[in-house]
Amino acid sequence: MSGGKILLSHGEGGKRTRELIRKVIAKRFDNPVLAPLFDSGLLGRLDGEVAFTTDGYVVTPAIFPGGDIGKLAVCGTLNDLSVCGARPVAVSCSLILEEGFPVKTLETILDSMKAAADEGNVPVACGDTKVVEKGNADGIFITTSGVGILRDGWRPAPEKVRPGDRVILSGTMGDHQTAVLIARNRLELSAEILSDVAPLSSMLIGVLDAFGEKVRFMRDPTRGGVGVSLNEMAESSRIRIVLDETRLPVAEGVRGICEILGFDPLYLANEGKALLIVDGGAAEGIVAALRKTAYGRNAAVIGEATDGTPGVLMKTAVGGMRAVDYPVGDQLPRIC
Amino acid sequence: MQLKYIDEFRDPGLARGLVEKTRAAWAGRPPMRIMEVCGTHTVSIARAGIRSLLSGVVTLISGPGCPVCVTPDGYIDAAVGLGMRPDTIIATFGDMLRVPGRRSSLEKERGNGIDARVLYSPLDAVEIAAKNKDKEVVFLGVGFETTAPSIAGAILAAADRKIPNFSVLSSVRTIPLAMEALASDPEVRIEGFLCPAHVSAIIGSDAYIPVAGKFGLPCVVAGFEPLDILCGIYMLLLQKKRGAASVENEYARVATAAGNRKALGVISRVFEPGDIAWRGIGVLPGTGLRIREDFSAFDAQVKFGIAVPSEAEKTACRCGDVLKGKITPPQCPLFGKACTPEEPYGPCMVSSEGSCAAYFKYGAA
């Protein structure tokens, strides 16, 4: 089957569908929950408060520097569970394939889904595959859902944020969107920029295990980037956040490209980062703990919760103060 | 040593020192009214929070140097009109799409079937024309001396490659005479000019000698980084303090006194000075760049027999007063209410370099 292309008949429920599911998909995800190929994955008894999430993935190109749509789909769902303090239990995989999509590319994508699921220690417990006529989709769309169990005694608590609490970002900003932007526009640049897409479950659950309620709540700054997530965090906790521009971690290559194209890394999407609002006294300890993990090496305190009208402000590198608002529309490159 | 050109020009320690020096030099005097002419300066000032750093020392007035903002609504109408012709492709820089004309915008009309494409370089429009010989490709030529060379270059390339289906709807402008018009307006009360960085790289700092001399105004060419701007402001204050009115160049690492001769040569080969309307300001003689008769085959106004009307429609939008620096954006009755970046009423709210957008996004602080 490798080397072939996806045909409409792969989605019609007949022999070809069975072949695709058994030989290409289920074979890769091989695990006891999926194996019987029942209409549902039977997860057994779950002990604790259940978290449930879902997300659709339509990134183009499907394969980009540092990852692909498969890794993205699994990591995105694992991270949505983890920032809510839920240990992931299982994820699903729903594929929409465009007629003519290369089976080999599909296999690459499924392999990275499997690798990400293994790293997050979860089975791909159920799935679905549909094929649409050529022109009715862009190669491949993936939807994943995830179920997790909340860590005992911890819930996201925006209402507990106090002046003096600190804002931590687990690493550099904007890597994912920059990598996709470069791949999409075939920009020839010397700096190699990789997407940061990564499963954060073990890092974040580890922090909760060690620091518990010192962590008030967390978000993963995906679409809209750190700028948008922080505005939402300020809104939900009714607090003012003041950022320190000199402490915002940005990889040098990303910064260079942002300067050239007129983008602000604050508003670029991340796929392997978390924002944490934590107790001021515990902040340095939490940063130290994050820095010991593979995906938190560049973690830093980037700001502080203060009194004042809720919103996000930034103390600029040169010492001025300005607002950090929601962006409007696409960030367009400068024209002169 | 490798100079990375970002950190060095945003160094917090140097900035602090410069701000202290500036405050000390100006202690006890009323704030100096300085106009930053260029939209990129406006954005950089807002982004770095420079107004808050130098409050009470200078009043920074945002000038007309945002190409989208000064393009009259009649131009947008003309562009929309051209786009509605059969088999026509409108090629444009991104910011122009959302600028409202009197009736519509290119973005809205794109939904009704206008083929409007966003490009980064005018040369890409020539390429589109070469590949679509059965269609007319009209490039919306807006901007200042910075975009003028590449627009002129595109026209030269189309002439050279004999691509007859390419043309430019020109709304290109030049800066120095517009500065003179603003300097002579008693309502604006400018006491010094922070001159554009990139424009000056093309035209050279000597281009401001007339405005400095005629109006007795200090002029400093400054780069776009926060330290460039702080340094430029400090230089302006020192000039004012000693009663000087000369042209100084803080951006000597890129801009020279004479400018880029090659770029200026390309501009003058294709364009000649003409009168042009500035949105909200009116017609400023000699500030436009008109396509020369030799290249009229590529002049969309000639080719399609259209004229761009210059009178502005009367509305509550005070973009004109914002562009002239008579009011700050929040003083406009529409600001943040009927006019927001999501639903812009005036062009200063549309462009990422517009003063209203910068005030809205980064706050007035």
Image (tube, grey):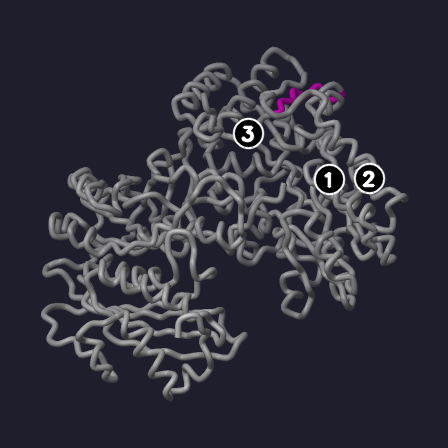
Q: Secondary structure at mark 1?
A: helix
Q: Nearer the viewer, residue B108 or B190?
A: B108
Residue denoted by label 1:
B148
Secondary element type, mark 2: strand
Whole-percent x, y for residue A67 in the image = 37, 56
Q: Provide the chain ID for the residue under circle 1.
A: B
Mark 3 belongs to chain:
B
For residue A275, the mark is none
Question: Which amino acid, by three-letter code, is at mark 2?
Answer: Phe
In the rendered image, the residue lying farthest to the right is: B293
* Residue at x 72% of width, y 22% of height: B258
Q: Residue B215: say if magenta.
A: yes
Kindly check if marks 2 and 1 are in contact, taking CB atoms under 8 A apart as contact. Answer: yes
Check the image and report above or below for B185 versus A240.
Answer: above
User: Do dots 3 and 1 share one subunit?
Assistant: yes
Residue B59 bears which disc, if any?
A: 3
The crowding category of the residue bearing disc 2, from other C-alpha atoms within 10 Å (few below 14, some 14 to 19, many at least 20), is many
- Determine the image quadrant of residue B201: top right
- The quarter in which the N terminus of chain A is drawn is bottom left
Q: Position of residue B265 (x, y in %)?
A: 79, 31
Report if residue B49 lies within the magenta region: no
Same chain for the residues under marks 2 and 1 in the image? yes
User: Label 1 amino acid?
Assistant: Ala
Asked if residue B195 is positioned above or below residue A173 in the image, the reply reads above
Measure the C-alpha gap from mark 3 to mark 1: 31 Å
Q: Is residue B289 visible?
A: yes
Label 3: how many Cα within 10 Å (few below 14, some 14–19, many 20+) = some
Quarter residue A107 falls in: bottom left
Residue contact between numbered discs 3 and 1, judged by CB atoms under 8 Å: no
Vertical order, B140 against B16 (above or below) = below
Residue identifier under label 2: B271
